[in-house]
Image (tube, rainbow, N blue to C red):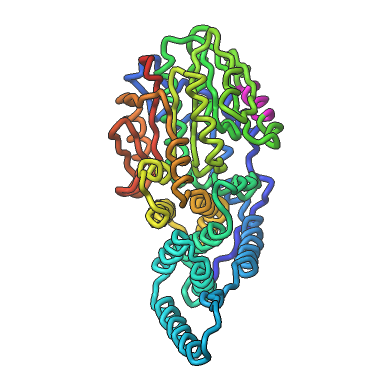
Amino acid sequence: MEPEPINLPIDELVSIENFYQSYSENSFPLQPDSPSNFNPERLLQIESEITQLLDFDIAIASLPEAQDSMEVLETGLIKVLETSIMEVDPLSDIVFQGQEEANEENSLGEEHSLLRVIQEELMEESSLTDLLLMGAEAVESQNWPVVSAIISKLNENLFNQENGNNPFNRLALFFTQGLHWKSIISPLEMPPRTFSRGPNTISAIQMIQELSPYIKFAHFTANQAILEATLTDRDVHVVDFDIMEGIQWPPLMVDLAIRDDASLWITAIVTDPETEASIRQTGRRLKEFADSINLRFTFDQLLIQEEEDFRTVHQVGHTVIANCMINQLHMPSKSLSMVRTFLGGMTTLSPKIVVLVEEELLNFAKASSSLSFVEFFCEALHHYMALSDSLVTGSSFTGGYEMCLKVIEQEVLGNRILDSVRQFPCEELERKLWRDGLCLKGFRPVPLSSSNVAQAKYLVSVFSGEYRVQYEKFRLALCWKSRPLTTASIWAPISRAV
């Protein structure tokens, strides 16, 4: 029997203003001044207050709307795939040139039919995984008719109800759409997709926050690194690549407030002029919060188009820190060119440290100089299935919770899959730009402190499932079983010691 839908009022969703107000009324210091001594229980207590915005029970309250939206979204996705995928017969585009004799044409026609039969039999016997990898191979070899045929077969299998409605099949649908997009446009020509921060997206992020240490790992690790790097500094200036709603910063602000006459300046980087208004609202909320804890605070935003734009960042008398989170689940994907511009701008800015948190899939692609699209695609399959498995295994998804997983897939995992597949370069020139642009020239990695590593280990211990942390080669990774999901590292200018 199908479980009855959860009918709770959508207006119970916590507003960002309420989350800041609640946090300001329940603030505690995150860290003593000594970086070697920390209180992870108190850290999580503060985080629970901060993330009323990301409260799981309240997130469930929005599921009736999410359920209706899911039906609309799924229907829309099916229509997009069914109507936009190239309906090309895999062998119909073969052009026979020259004036051939009739008997030769008949012979070629027979061979043509035989090849069609062999191809169809191979696809009939292939699993979804095999078909996806065959599609990736066809994309890499630019065999577009075969790509179209494989996509059609994938759609047929995925929309066949007898195959079951399970997490892998649902994620496979996004990989199929990614292959289609990859077959029709170059990643360097691909404009960034519009990121919608609607109620369903907020709900999905709330659920991830409750079910996984993924978001907390990024925020806690970055903030701890900043605190340690500025231990003897009074005035701290953070340049934030993607501030979003600013939920990373209240814990850091509380810690700075207990220092004598400390101040915090945050410069939010703007890459899309259409987001300037929402970023100003984030700044207003952070300023109100800073006033509530008596912290001197300045907020500004900087629209960047090229590396030279970073020269306008105020640095006199301040310790500058760069905070760069790339392709995190709770953030919109940034274009390759924009990531290149930001990381390249660090050479101009020369901050005391750059805190870099990356989706491990991106780092895998960056580190593998000769990586093919097929190899990346296979790695992406494993990566996103591990993420999905961590959410399923870490919870009891039954009844309404199954709908929670579907919302996460539709609003978060699906978008990440599409962006990953769309943006990975196939051509050698594209790969060179990818490798050269995603690096910090003039910087060296520096070790994370034992406090930071211990904090991460404590964090994963409070979540169920097989989460663990791995620290090697200056990189701290959050892992599901043996597979890294996201990694954090600290970088300092070669000419400067932290």
Q: Position of residue 328 (x, y in %)?
A: 49, 41
- Is residue 141 visible from the viewing direction of this image? yes
Which residue is found at the position 58% from the left and 65% from the top?
Answer: 4
Left or right: 92 in relation to 40: right
Task: From this view, report whether residue 98 is shown above or below residue 231.
Answer: below
Residue 287 counted in the magenta span: yes
| Residue sitting nearer the eye, 258 or 138 | 138
Q: Quadrant of residue 227?
A: top left
Q: Where does residue 275 sit, x and y in percent of width and height?
A: 67, 35
* 391 is within the stretch colored magenta: no
Q: Position of residue 17 (x, y in %)?
A: 66, 32
Question: As rendered, which of 256 and 183 lies closer to the eye?
Answer: 183
- One can see residue 398 in this view: no
Which residue is painted at 49% across and 24% down in the image? 346
Screen quadrant of the C terminus: top left
Tell me the magenta residue range. Answer: 280-289
Residue at the extreme bottom:
103
